[in-house]
Amino acid sequence: MSTGRKITLSENTLFGMGNPLLDISAVVDKDFLDKFGLKPNDQILAEDKHKALFDEIVKRNKVEYHAGGSTQNSVKIAQWMIQKPHKVATFFGCIGADNFGEILKKKAEECHVDAHYYEQNEEPTGTCAACITGDNRSLVANLAAANCYKKEKHLDLDSNWELVKKAKVYYIAGFFLTVSPESILKVAKHASDNNKIFCMNLSAPFISQFFKEPLMKVMPYVDILFGNETEAATFAKELGFETDDIAEIAKKTQNLPKDNTKRQRVVVFTQGKDDTVATVEHKRSVGDAESRH
């Protein structure tokens, strides 16, 4: 995809902000999913009934730990693809002043991501259980500290806002709408006012269902929108598009009101192993999933 001009990769070119979580990943069985009322392929926020899940998944299964969270994972992969220079990717989010927080800082540093966490003592570092069955994975996120991000105590600080201003591309997952929509809006407006690229992900069906108002406040500033087929269908339903055709949903989403008219919105909807649908300059392209690996 052409962005109209070549972006020079230097430190802090890519900015991400979201929910930093320690991923706890394990293969489970259907009984485990049923016990905690989980769907095989889903992303949900932990409720009281899920609290025992985090202890049990560790006791019952051999687990892997990863520094995670949707946006942090994305900027980590971007940095891995770029390789050098290091610290092209910047990441903001909130963690606890605890051992898991120290692990996250270490992991980010190992991945050469320039992570600047807001640390607080009220909540522990967030976790996410990835319950894997076959080709499916059900994510249960306990945001904890990630839910405590404060715009005025972190994003608004001059030293941190300078890092935001250095960036040319911004990526924030829809999950962060549950935490600090005012932070997203500040970054999105900066990108739009300065003709920079602001990207967002629909993240999960519940975002469109229960956080539609903050999502639609940000949408006029979104240059590139990502999502999968389930998220796209839910988004379309919530906006009354009256179609379940993914390509048509992408076109209608592209044509939603936009603040910066210098950049036409690009919409990218993945469909697992099936074709990815992307809109480009009032056209829709369907790429074969196999050819993009």
Image (tube, grey):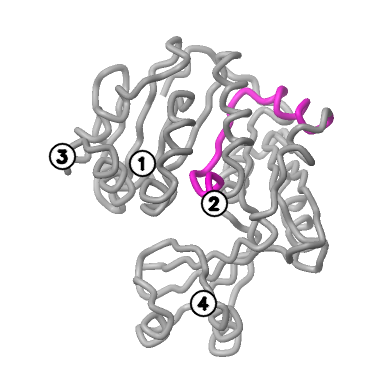
Q: Nearer the viewer, residue 282 or 150?
A: 150
Asked if the residues shown at circle 2 and circle 3 are in contact, with their CB atoms under 8 angstroms apart, the answer is: no
Q: Nearer the viewer, residue 268 or 205?
A: 205
Secondary element at tag 4? helix
Task: Classify mark 2: residues with Cα within 10 Å, few (<14), some (14-19) or many (20+).
Answer: some
| Quarter location, residue 38 | bottom left
User: Could you tell which of marks 2 and 3 lies nearer the N-terminus?
Assistant: 2
Q: Amino acid at mark 4?
A: His
Residue at x-position 69% and y-position 42%: 91
Provide the residue designation for mark 2.
70
Secondary element at tag 1? helix
Residue at x-position 28% and y-position 53%: 273
Q: Nearer the viewer, residue 6 or 284?
A: 284
- Is 11 situated above or below 142? above
Provide the residue designation for mark 3.
243
Task: Classify mark 1: residues with Cα within 10 Å, few (<14), some (14-19) or many (20+).
Answer: few
- Taken as a whole, is the magenta stretch helix, strand or loop? helix
Residue 163 place in picture, x, y as percent: 75, 29
162 in magenta = yes
- Is 12 situated above or below 28? above
| Quarter location, residue 69 | bottom right
Provide the residue designation for mark 1.
292
* Residue lying farthest to the top in this orientation: 262
Task: Classify mark 4: residues with Cα within 10 Å, few (<14), some (14-19) or many (20+).
Answer: some
- Is 213 situated above or below 203? above
User: Could you tell which of marks 4 and 2 lies nearer the N-terminus?
Assistant: 4
Asked if the residues shown at circle 4 and circle 2 are in contact, with their CB atoms under 8 angstroms apart, the answer is: no
Q: Seen in the image, is 263 located left or right of residue 250? A: right
Magenta span = 159-178
